[in-house]
Every structure is written in C-alpha cells, then in structure tokens.
Image: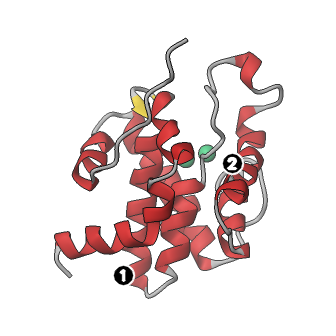
C-alpha cells in the first residue's frame, strides 16, 4: 500500500475524532519535551494503525484507541489541574473524555485504560491493547531523546490544533 493510501485510510478511520475540538485541543499542552499531546497521540495512533495493518489486527481500534489514549485534556505540568497521580490517573480521565466524545467500543476503552501498564491502569485485554501499550512506550522514548519530529506527521495529515480561546 502506498504512503498516500495508508494516510488516506488512517484519516478515514479517525476523521470523526480529528474533526473534534477535544482531540484538536490536545495541541495546547506539551507532553514529552517540546512535543504536544496532540502530536504524540497522532504519532502513537498512526504507528499503531500501521503495525496493526501489518499484523492483520483491528486497525480501527488501534488507530482510534491510539488517538484517544491520552485525551485527559489538561496541562499535566499544572498540579492544580489534576489532584491525583498523573501516571496512574490520566488513563481514566482519557477514557471518560473519549466515552463522552464518541461511541467507544469495549476494546478501545481497554486500550486507553491499559496504555500505562505495567506502571498503572488496567491489564491490556486484546492484541491491539498490547500493541498500543508498546507503541506508546517506544514513541515516548523517541520523543524524549528528540530523534523524531511528530509535528511533521500532523502537518502531513492536515490536522490543525485548536488554539486557546483568548482570556
Ligand atoms: Fe499516557
Ligand atoms: Fe502516550
């Protein structure tokens, strides 16, 4: 499959989410170093989609679960924005926001809730959940050592972050 066709298929699986304010809003906050939560989530979603396709797994669940796995929607550096422990609590916040945004399948919900395993959260219950868990770890490491620029993927896919409203 050509790069163009791959990107087109990924966009068709995630279009409803990419058009939403909630997903585009993730571009407001930095997640790993200079990488925003939106760019990280797109990197995880697209990489998970590609691997799921290669392995013959559920590409829709991998793409959508990957895109929504960090949909906690606050600045993780702002301690007043989240009272508990970010590492353990953010998968539950992301699952709540994702369920309010879209008709989430049980598999997609478990992908979100288990993406921090074994540090916290639920046990992955599908091959797609194990895949997103692994891809998230690898993407985070690549972002932290700054050997990739996920913002390029976002630009190529034509996803525009939602600007913060003026105070
Ligand atoms: Fe996360
Ligand atoms: Fe993540």
Residue at mark 1: C-beta within 8 A of ligand 2: no
- Locate residue 14, reporting x and y percent: 45, 65
Relative to 103, is 13 on the left or the right?
Answer: left
- Give me the residue at 43% from left, 27% from top: 33
Q: CA distance from mark 2 to mark 1?
A: 27 Å
Question: Quick one: label 1, few (<14), some, or many (20+) residues within 10 Å?
Answer: few
- Outermost residue on the front side: it is 166
Question: Quick one: label 2, few (<14), some, or many (20+) residues within 10 Å?
Answer: many
- Give me the residue at 72% from left, 66% from top: 110
Residue with the mark numbered 2: 94
Element under disc 1: helix
Residue with the mark numbered 1: 54
Q: How many marks?
A: 2
Q: Quadrant of residue 80?
A: top right
Q: Quadrant of residue 98?
A: bottom right
- Locate residue 91, reporting x and y percent: 71, 49
Relative to 33, is 160 on the left or the right?
Answer: left
Element under disc 2: helix
Q: Nearer the viewer, residue 81 or 47?
A: 81
Q: Is residue 166 above or below residue 41?
A: above
Q: How is the image coloured?
A: secondary structure
- Outermost residue on the top side: it is 167
Q: Nearer the viewer, residue 144 or 64?
A: 64
């Amino acid at each position: 499959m050509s790069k163009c066709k791959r990107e087109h298929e990924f966009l068709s699986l995630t279009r409803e989410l990419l058009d939403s304010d909630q997903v585009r809003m993730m571009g407001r906050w930095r997640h790993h170093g200079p990488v925003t939560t939106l760019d990280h989530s797109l990197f995880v979603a697209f990489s998970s989609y590609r691997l799921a396709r290669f392995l013959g797994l559920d590409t829709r669940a991998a793409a959508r679960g990957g895109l929504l796995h960090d949909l906690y929607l606050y600045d993780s550096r702002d301690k007043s924005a989240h009272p508990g422990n970010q590492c353990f609590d953010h998968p539950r916040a992301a699952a709540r926001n994702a369920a309010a945004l879209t008709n989430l399948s049980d598999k997609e919900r478990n992908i979100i809730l288990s993406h921090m395993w074994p540090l916290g959260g639920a046990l992955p219950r599908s091959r797609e959940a194990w895949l997103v868990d692994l891809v998230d770890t690898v993407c985070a490491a690549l972002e932290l050592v700054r050997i990739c620029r996920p913002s390029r993927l976002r630009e190529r896919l034509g996803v525009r972050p939602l600007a913060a409203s003026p105070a």
